[in-house]
Image (cartoon, grey):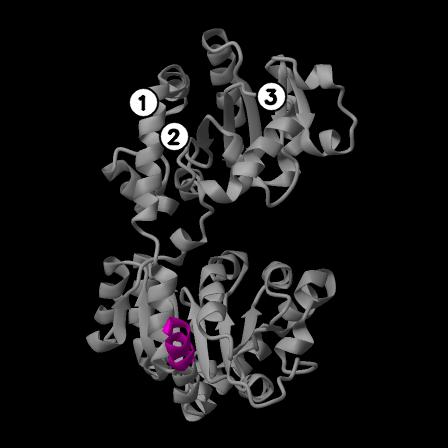
Amino acid sequence: MWLYDLIYLLAAVVSAPVLAYLLVRRPRIRDGVWERLGRGLPRRDGPRRCVWIHGVSVGEVLGARPLVAELRRRFPELDLAVSTTTGTGFAMAQRHYGEHTLLRYPIDVGFAVRRALDAIRPAVVVLVEGEIWPNFLAHCRRRSIPVVLVNGRMTERSFRGYRRLRWLLRPGLDAIRLWCAQSGEYAERYRALGIPAARVLETGSLKYDALLQPEDVEQDGARYRSVFGVGEAPVLVAGSTHEGEERAVLEAYAGLCRRVPALRLVIVPRHLERVVQVQRYCQQARFVPVCKTAIDRGEVEPARLGSPETVFVVDTIGELARLYAMATVVFVGGSLVRHGGQNVLEPAGLGKPVVVGPHTYNFRAAVALLREADAIVQIGGAEELEGALGELLENEERARAVGDRARAAVEARRGAARRTVDAIARFLPPAVVTAVGEREVTRSRP
């Protein structure tokens, strides 16, 4: 641990001018910095045992939702603490886990780590996906606090980096008592790092358990159709679009309107700062853009909502997963351009027929799963978009079959939260596990 602290100290000295500049010029970096240094931390009091769950940022925080729900269901006697590194991740944790202890993950220096562990007093630490800080892990090991890595993933690039620094990271890696991998590929990389096979489990991905199901959003679909004034008309939802894709979608939509005159289009750009640009593209394509916030404020006439020239642009955050419920067919963005794609599982889990472009490397496993089940339509480029969407819109039987297969493929992958909590339970204090067993026996009695 003294070696890690020395390395961090030297790095801080060398980068001090840059750090000072960033702290002054970028307020978001200052946000929570004292807490990360161990000052002003929330403190847990009382005898209840605690599981500390850490997710780096928004994706990991949201991905932990089914895990937190399963822990609460199975072990209500436990306290839960949730930490994150980024400001956006902390805001999301406040939104979803406000009833639990929330904190910023400590900077990986000895005094900050010690203060955080003293404040939270965890019985078990759970790391979501794979942020590994050696000093934190070394201190957990010294205090005999078991650490479990869950929903683990390790790309080929990360694997090469860890292998080069294995001599330095070895004490930290050894402190992780159990590695719960999303897939066999990731599990094999953990073993190749020298992790004993007995400490590596393939538990599946929590993202499948986090997905909404059709029954969860049935009312949302009807509500959004009412808000947009589309009634029972077929709707194309273009979700998480990036620069270079809206024009392709609008061009395809213009052709589709001649084939399916009642069709309506909803565009959800990935980044809110591009909304004005997307509106401009709509106007250039001779459509009238209408933003959702304008509808919410009552600024749009009903006649405009019902016009076939109207294209809806969603300029709000956090609605896309439920917006998919109103879709007849879905295009998932980030895939016609070299971004690597966006989340195809959200609409697939709702039984929606999904079309994507050729660039889906960020979601390679998810797309491969759906392609193997013949549950997604992947095209080679923008010139094929109208044809692929038109086939699904004009052939309801095929669209329904693709959507049904997509939902079935997703459903078959659920259950990672249960398997992961089973793994964590190995390290919970016996009194907690015994209490759960006694409660289950009592419930089963006539």
Q: Mark on residue 398?
A: 1
Q: Earlier in the sequence, mark 1 or mark 2?
A: 2
- Residue 280: x, y in percent? 65, 23
Residue 270 can be seen, yes or no: no
Near-viewer residue (192 or 223): 223
- Residue 40: x, y in percent? 70, 81
Residue drawn at (28%, 61%) of the image: 186
Query: Residue 437 colored magenta?
Result: yes
- How many numbered callouts? 3
The residue indicated by pointer 2 is 353
Q: Check the image and report above or below for 22 versus 254.
A: below
Near-viewer residue (283 or 93): 93
The residue indicated by pointer 3 is 230
Q: Are marks 1 and 2 in contact (CB under 8 Å)?
A: yes
Foreground mark, 2 or 3, reads 3
Residue drawn at (68%, 82%) of the image: 39
Amino acid at pointer 1: Arg
Q: Earlier in the sequence, mark 1 or mark 3?
A: 3
Q: Quadrant of the C terminus?
A: bottom left
Amino acid at pointer 2: Pro
Cα distance in 3D space between marks 1 and 2: 9 Å
Amino acid at pointer 3: Val
Q: Which residues are magenta?
A: 436-446
